[in-house]
Image: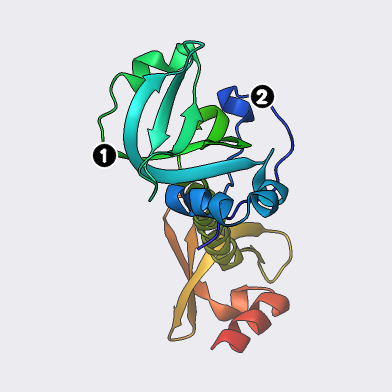
Amino acid sequence: QTATTESQPAMGTGEDSHPTDLSVSDAAAVFAAYERNEVQADNQIKGKWLAIKGSVNKIGKDILDTPYVALSTKSHIFSVQCMFTKADENILSQLQPEQIVVIAGKCDGKMGNVLIRQCWFYDADRKQREEAQRQAAIRQQAAIERAQAEKERKAAIEAAKWRTWTDASGAHKMEAKFSGMTAGNVKLTKRDGSVLTLPLEKLSDEDQEWIKKRK
């Protein structure tokens, strides 16, 4: 197995500037790639951002008092050494040997150990969560739009039931909803809920025609 990663632009190590779309490689695979061909491994991953998963072998400090986490490899001597800052010491103090972690940082090649600098603990599931949240937001917005469309559809249907009626003389008009017809009499429901019953011929020709089409 070879180490894999994606080329990332140089950036600071503040949380907001960390790359969030890294491929996660196994620590043993990264180390093995350097063991097989150091020149090739440098060409592939040196200077690039990596996310590396492995078992904690050691939590310590180098000769410059820089804290690090060493991830186990198949080598009994060397490891993938992930360099942190003094600001990270509180987090590192909570680690335990053999704990499985995913650490991201920039590969600095191999000097006995494979060195990874500017490290932070990588949230390998962050991209999936963000995508899930994005999809959920899309579904929620679609549901809101469907509900609004249904509300407007029902409102349109209700509005279509109301019309302005005119009597046969054309002198009087009334807004009401057609509520049926019995024995030649038309039932019209007003806005206030009251029902007016009148002979069909008392309505204008246009209204009579409208009712006949619905019968």
Residue lying at 55% horizontally and 57% vertically, measured from the top left: 142
Residue 107, above or below 213: above
For residue 79, the mark is none
**Left or right of residue 95: residue 30:** right
x, y percentage for residue 155?
A: 55, 58
Is residue 78 found left or right of 168 in the rendered image?
left
Which amino acid is tagged 2?
Gly
Q: Is residue 122 visible?
A: no
Q: SS class of the residue under badge 2?
A: loop
Q: CA distance from mark 2 to mark 1?
A: 29 Å
Q: Amino acid at mark 1?
A: Glu
Say which residue label 1 marks. 98
Report the residue at 52% width, 36% height from top.
112
Question: Quadrant of residue 102 in the image?
Answer: top left
Quadrant in which residue 16 is drawn: top right
**Front-lying residue, 146 or 129:** 129
In terms of depth relative to the viewer, which is nearer, 74 or 88?
Answer: 74
Q: Nearer the viewer, residue 34 or 193?
A: 34
Q: Is residue 39 visible?
A: yes
In this figure, which residue is indicated by the disc labeled 2? 12
Q: Name the residue at 39% across, 39% down.
A: 77
Q: Position of residue 84 (x, y in %)?
A: 49, 22
For discs 2 and 1, the disc positioned in front in the rendered view: 1
Which quadrant of the structure image shows residue 97? Answer: top left
Q: Residues within 10 Å of mark 1 (few under 14, many from 20)?
A: few
Which is more toward the observer, 165 or 62?
A: 62
* Number of marks present in the image shown: 2
Neighbour class for label 2 at 10 Å: few (<14), some, many (≥20)? Answer: few
